[in-house]
Amino acid sequence: MRRDSRLSGVLHVLLHMARHEGPSTSEVLAQAMETNPVVIRRIMAGLREHGYVRSEKGHGGGWTLACDLSKVTLRDVYTALGCPSLLAIGNRTEAPGCLVEQAVNAALGPTFRAAEELLLAQLGEVTLAQLAADVERRHRTTKGRPRKEHHHV
C-alpha cells in the first residue's frame, strides 16, 4: 500500500518558503518536491483558504507565507489538507453481517481510534516555528560538511 506523504511534502514546502525571501512559483516548488506544478497549485489553494499562504499573480509573483509560524501547528496543516487518513490499516467492511468480522472490528476499532487521537494530539503540539528552528539548527551544524544535494526553493 502506498503511503500518503502529502503532509510531509507540504511541511517541506512551507519550511523552504520560510527560508526563502520573496515569492516562490508553483514551478519552483514543484521542482523541489519532484511533482507537477498543478499538484502544488491545488495544495497551495487549500492552504490559502486557511490563511497560511497567499499568491501574487504576474511577473515576480508566486506563493508566500501569510501566517505566523508560531501559531500554526502540524495538525492545522493536516486539517488544511482535508484530514487524509492517518493509518494505513483499518477494519475490514466487506461482510458487515459476519459475526467474525464484527468481533474483529469491535476489538480493533477502539485501538485504531486511540492511535489516531494520540497522533492528532501530538501533531497539535508542534508548530511550524519549532520545525523552522530545527531546520536552522541543522543548517548551522552541517555548514562546511558535504550534504546530499536537494533542489532548494
Image (cartoon, rainbow, N blue to C red):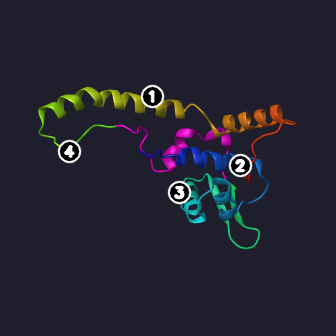
Q: Earlier in the sequence, mark 3 or mark 2?
A: 2
Q: Label 2 near label 3: C-beta < 8 Å?
A: no
Q: Which residue is mark 3?
A: 46
Separation of disc 3 and disc 2 at Cα? 18 Å
Separation of disc 4 and disc 2 at Cα? 43 Å
Q: Which residue is mark 4?
A: 94
* Residue 43 figure quarter: bottom right
Q: Earlier in the sequence, mark 4 or mark 2?
A: 2
Report the residue at 59% width, 48% height from top.
Answer: 9
Q: Nearer the viewer, mark 3 or mark 2?
A: 2
Q: Give the number of the disc on residue 60.
A: none
Q: For the magenta stretch, what is the residue range?
A: 66-89
Q: Is residue 33 left or right of residue 146?
A: left
* Residue 31 figure quarter: bottom right
Q: Is disc 1 surrounded by few (<14), some (14 to 19) or many (20+) residues within 10 Å?
A: few
Residue 119 in the image: x percent, y percent? Answer: 47, 31
Q: Secondary structure at mark 3?
A: helix
Q: Nearer the viewer, mark 1 or mark 2?
A: 2
Q: Is residue 51 left or right of residue 62?
A: left
Q: Give the number of the disc on residue 118.
A: 1
Q: Is disc 2 surrounded by few (<14), some (14 to 19) or many (20+) residues within 10 Å?
A: some
Separation of disc 3 and disc 1 at Cα? 25 Å
Q: Is residue 3 above or below residue 24?
A: above
